Amino acid sequence: MQNPARYAAPVGRILLALIFIASAFGKFADWQMPLKMMADKDVPSPEVLLPIAVALELGGGLLVAAGFYARVGGLMLLLFLVPVSYFMHDFWNYEDAGQRMEQMINFMKNVAIMGGALLVVAFGSGVCSIDHWRAKPSASEHPAK
């Protein structure tokens, strides 16, 4: 009988990746909105950084979800999350307590998601993944005795 825990990794990877994939498609749907948000937050060169951010979000999300080069995908998500958390959820710059709390919650959610991405980087994608399938030796590499 299969161990049901083996399926936790692919479900977890998909759940982790969904927010990035959905967010990237949202940016494609209204490219001007994130550009304006970035400009309002004084992000340098938003016209250059937005396409990079979307590539990291979508590429990293798809790699993690598929379990294909999942460690690379996890690293891509981290490269996206660190600057986004710093620039877009800068709770320390808000005087209004409600806005400060809202941004701190979003910042801390990103920190938690970074933890999930770090787990993917550290431990890979698990046994139910393309990475695991690709790593298995083929029959031609280990002939029967």
Image (tube, rainbow, N blue to C red):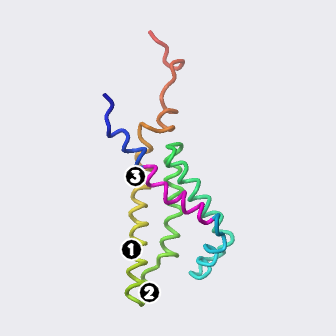
Q: Mark 2 sits on what residue?
A: 94
Q: Is residue 27 above or below residue 60?
A: below
Determine whether, in the image, residue 132 is placed left or right of residue 56. left
Crowdedness near tag 1: few (<14), some (14–19) or many (≥20) residues, C-alpha within 10 Å: some
Q: Is residue 70 above or below residue 1?
A: below
Q: Which of the two discs, 3 and 2, sits closer to the camera?
A: 2
Q: In the displayed orientation, state which residue is furthest to the front.
A: 29
Q: Mark 1 sits on what residue?
A: 105
Between the C-alphas of marks 3 and 2, the distance is 31 Å
Between the C-alphas of marks 2 and 1, the distance is 13 Å
**In the rendering, at what x and y percent does residue 36 appear?**
63, 78
Name the chief secondary structure element in magenta. Answer: helix
Crowdedness near tag 3: few (<14), some (14–19) or many (≥20) residues, C-alpha within 10 Å: some
Q: Which numbered marker is on residue 119?
A: 3
Q: Residue at x 54, y 59 (%)?
A: 22
Q: Which residues are magenta?
A: 13-27
Q: Residue at x 50, y 38 (%)?
A: 131
- Quadrant occupied by the N terminus: top left
Q: Amino acid at mark 3?
A: Leu
- Quadrant occupied by the C terminus: top left
State how many labels appear.
3
Q: Amino acid at mark 2?
A: Tyr
Compare marks 3 and 2 and give the one earlier in the sequence.
Answer: 2
In the image, 67 versus 44, the foreground residue is 67
**In the rendering, at what x and y percent does residue 130 appear?**
51, 37
Q: In the displayed orientation, state which residue is furthest to the top.
A: 145
